[in-house]
Amino acid sequence: MDALKTTPVEDLAEDEAAAELARLAKAIAHHDRRYYQEDAPEIDDAAYDELRRRNSAIEARFPHLIRADSPSQRIGAPPVAAFGKVRHAVPMLSLDNAFDEEEVAEFVRRIRRFLNLGEDAALDFVAEPKIDGLSATLRYERGVLVQGATRGDGSEGEDVTANLKTLQDVPLQLDGDAPAVLEVRGEVYMEHEAFAALNQARSQAGEAVFANPRNAAAGSLRQLDPSITAKRPLRFFAYSWGEAEPKVTGTYGGFLERLRGLGFRTNPQTRHGSSVDDLVAYHAELGHHRADLGYDIDGVVYKLDRIDLQERLGFVGRAPRWAIAHKFAAEQAETTIEDIQIQVGRTGALTPVAHLKPVTVGGVVVARATLHNQDYIQEKDIRIGDTVVVQRAGDVIPQVVEVVAQLRPEGTVPFTFPDRCPVCGSQAVRPEGEAIRRCTGGLICPAQLVERLKHFVARDAFDIEGLGKLQIPQLHEAGLVESPADLFRLASEPDRKAKLLELPRWGAKKVENLLTAIEERRRIGLDRFVYALGIRFIGEVNAKLLARHYHDLDHFREAMAKVAEGDADARAELEAIDGVGPKLVEALAEFFAEAHNLDAVDDLLTYVTVVPVEAPKAQATSRLAGKTVVFTGTLEQMSRAEAKARAEQLGAKVTGSVSKSTDLVIVGADAGSKAKKAAELGVEVVDEAGWLALAKG
């Protein structure tokens, strides 16, 4: 590194101070990397400490010259009242999971089908450990870290810039020739030894200990006082990117090399593979050495190496088509069932839950486990008093795997599944062809109401911080919340606020934080709004499909009202949406045919503004922008799935059937009735060659 000036701090002119702070920031960052990441220090501790002391002295004399990449940021900025929100320029999506070799093989086959590739076509993958931590994104502009955020719901996270700056693995300024803009994504985690030491210190201080390293990492990163985060031993592995200028190209393996050149840590366990056998073998090898890594992982992530193929594959729902997480087998333990109770969900589903003698499974104490449904209990003959094997499916959801029959005590009796709702007493019926028994009480059933409200405030719905599985039942029992609109009345009606303050564990600060969180959710996107309504069969993916198709709430409600009334054209339009099936159509018709549902929506809309969904960004010159298109027949140059994805990228709506609202039909080989109907309606038709010309944009 360049030699630094030795002019006394008190004699430095302002321009000299600014220049030296720049050189100090670069020098200290270099020595931090040599020490923390490469384990190869170039200077002794005394010399390093002198660099930091000089930097602090110059900043104390010229506080207005403190740099964004200053080494002083490592010790934490002043505390904040609450985290701000960061809208991700490129969504931080999740991964689909595979649990065995066949699911990995199917993942590869899906890629080949989508890209229309034969079995002999080469496909290269990169496999890397799936770190069990907290996802974060770092935004660099002209090489300087300007913002850091959590993943949040994938679209919006929390601004934890000051906290992330305290991590030694996070460069404040990038090495080498940095791009104009680069968002680097990765995982914040805590190593086993550091976690044990932290918990020991907390225990000795009389503080609550963390359940596992992931919880410790998440709690440490989300401290309102960054100086606390600075004292926690957090690490960071970089593995992906968001917004980038210039665009990231080449291969994923090459991108990881560039990250290392810019000063990031990437996981040294990363491997390349060119077949399912390669990937599965790596998964098995890493599983054998999992305990030796020094940090928690819960599987392996496989990513297609070529970035141009990743772009062609795109995403489905919330997950990329070009990557998958191959999870490790769930850890198991034996315990006894002390009771079986029935839980009533928001759609009236009666779910049996085993109450267990607490047991540790995979580092987490498990006291309850799902028994799925009536058939599951009968097939396995699960009884109260049985010794059972319990596992955390995907290392998350506890479930009973099997009964240890030889340990069954005398006198146990088979479990009798109720035919009445245990909460409201309404009849519980099991529709033909379904495994689930459901309460018929609807919104008169308190359990369904409470579960619907829990769903309404959940992260992927209204995402109201401070409300969850404990608070919602408490507010309902107190008579404060009977409907979604009542949540917003908490913030607008003084009497409700006063009553809230009287409840146990609701101090003035907690109430103010809740009311602030509620106020922040008075504007919500159409997709989140539709999902929050809790209509059966509508998950996040279907909510997004509906929102993209109908665009705004007025059009959506008008169309659903017509579907509920039996309007054939409206129903045909709904059924034509690619991905919408008959069960979902029936559920929507039932919901919008009920007057009390419509009243609840109208009541809610007196407090909430629903924002139209953003249409996919289309190329300015695209002929398909805003058009409704249908594919029929077999395409030879690309798969149907890729063709649909490309049409949506160009701003089109892709539907499954031809109607008078269809603008274009793309006809491949062996086209059937859709081509005929297009001709009857006078809809424009193009062949595959015409489609390929349009697909170029």
Image (cartoon, rainbow, N blue to C red):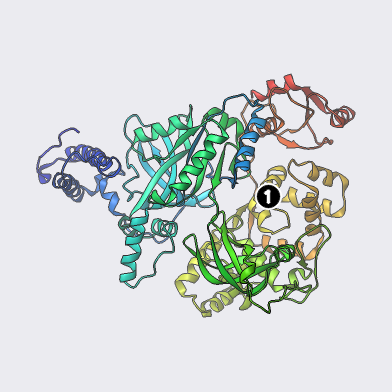
Q: In this view of the protein, which residue sits in the foreground, 160 or 645?
A: 645
> Can you give x and y, in whole percent of width and height, for residue 595 in the image?
80, 64
* Residue at the outermost right position: 680
Residue at 68% from the left image edge and 54% from the top image edge: 530
Q: Is residue 505 left or right of residue 315?
A: left
- Asked if 577 appears above or below 166 in the picture, the reply is above
Quarter-of-image position of residue 379:
bottom right
Circle 1 residue: 543
**Where residue 644 sits in the image (x, y, percent)?**
70, 33
Above or below, 616 against 97 in this view is above
- Dot 1 falls on a residue whose secondary structure is helix
Q: Is residue 614 left or right of residue 675?
A: left
Residue 597: name its quadrant: bottom right
Quadrant holding the C terminus: top right
Q: Amino acid at mark 1?
A: Ala
Displayed quadrant of residue 648: top right
Q: Can see residue 655?
A: yes
* Residue 486 seen in the current view: no
What residue do we see at 23% from left, 42% from top?
28
On the image, the x and y values in percent for residue 493 come to 59, 72
